[in-house]
Amino acid sequence: MFGESFSLFRVLGFEIRANVTWLFLALLVTWSLAAGFFPFVYPDLTPLTYWTMALVGMLGLFFSLLFHELSHSVVARAHGLPVHRITLFLFGGAAEMESEPEEPRVEFRMAIAGPIASVVLGVAFYLLAVAMATVGLPEHVAGVARYLGFINILLAIFNMVPGFPLDGGRVLRAALWQLKGDIRWATRWATRMGQGFGLLLVALGFANFIAGNFVGGMWWFLIGLFVHAAATASYSQLLTQQALAGRTVRRFMTADPVTVPADATVEEFVEEYLYHHNFDRFPVVRGERLVGSIGLSEVRDVPREERDRTRVEDACEERVKENTIEADMKADEALNRMQQSRTGRLMVTEGDRLVGMLVLKDLLRYLDVRSELEPD
């Protein structure tokens, strides 16, 4: 939804990733603190001091958001919901779960864990600021810790707004779900609250622009857009999961796909397959055993004069987890993998045997048709 993300490190078994929007946030926060907030609160310091304080403040914000999301992830994992990665976005983060909670109480526990963690961290930073002042450190040094304490308390309060997918929205969804027993109905209403809250923030941003508060207006405007887009995407994700519920990859795969023998030469592959089929990649097999896949990029890596004596098996991309999927995997999990890896085709296997190809456009076509037939 928000562009590319890149891996940073692992914590407690979770892969930590940062979206490209986080870079924008880091630069914006650092500039705002160094050029606006800290000079206003602590005047007459050197520019280097302000920028150092701002950098520490930005890193503290990064740690605070990560701590918040880790609390969600640890609780989710404790309830048997796999969380493989945490991605930090503009103004927040997301613990990427393979499936939604199956009970309202689990949803509530996961949701409330984040704000509680932020409050605990906020109090810890305030106590750190007091300790710094007690031992005689300069006021502006303790001020950075005090700022991070305030930010964490603000983060907890903001996240408790009852609009999905904010934590308060998830708490609201858990309550509505418990009340009526329908997660789709509960998500729809919690999402509408989230979308409305996002539009309210956008309107507040415009009001600040008109009043001459450009920086404040920009913050409210961007946060509003983020909340509205996240709410819309979260509801769409739930609809997709429900549309694919109970269906496996086998239901959507193309059986008996066009395959290339491992012993064929690269030249034979070009002449007999690449020129004759409108596919970007082809499975490479030896008998029924899947060896890997080959496409135009692998052909380009082979010098033209060597193509007639180079075997496809030696030139192809090996079979790896990223390009294969088991036939009995849940269809919604397969869709998530294809979207995250930005691939349009996956080879479907049973053990070492190739049994089909899963094509992204086939999954999306099914979802489009179903949305037309069942718009509610």
Image (spheres, rainbow, N blue to C red):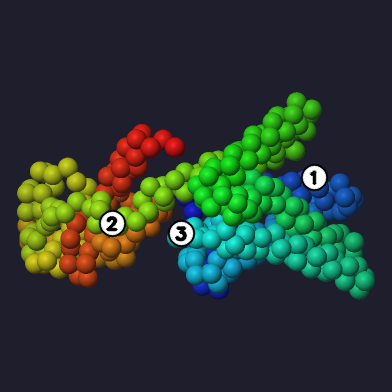
Name the residue tied to disc 3: 99
Distance between the alpha carbons at the discs numbered 2 and 1: 53 Å
**Residue furthest front in the image:** 180
User: Which amino acid is tagged 2?
Assistant: Val
Q: Residues within 10 Å of mark 3 (few under 14, many from 20)?
A: few
Q: Earlier in the sequence, mark 3 or mark 1?
A: 1
Please provide percent x and percent y for residue 376.
Answer: 44, 37
Q: Position of residue 109 (x, y in %)?
A: 62, 63
Residue beneath label 2, please? Answer: 249
Q: Is residue 250 visible?
A: yes
The residue closer to the viewer here, 169 or 131, is 169
Front-most of residues 297 and 213: 213
Q: Which mark is residue 36?
A: 1
On residue 229, which mark appears? none
**Of discs 2 and 1, which sits in the foreground?**
2
Position of residue 273 in the picture relative to residue 211 (left or right): left
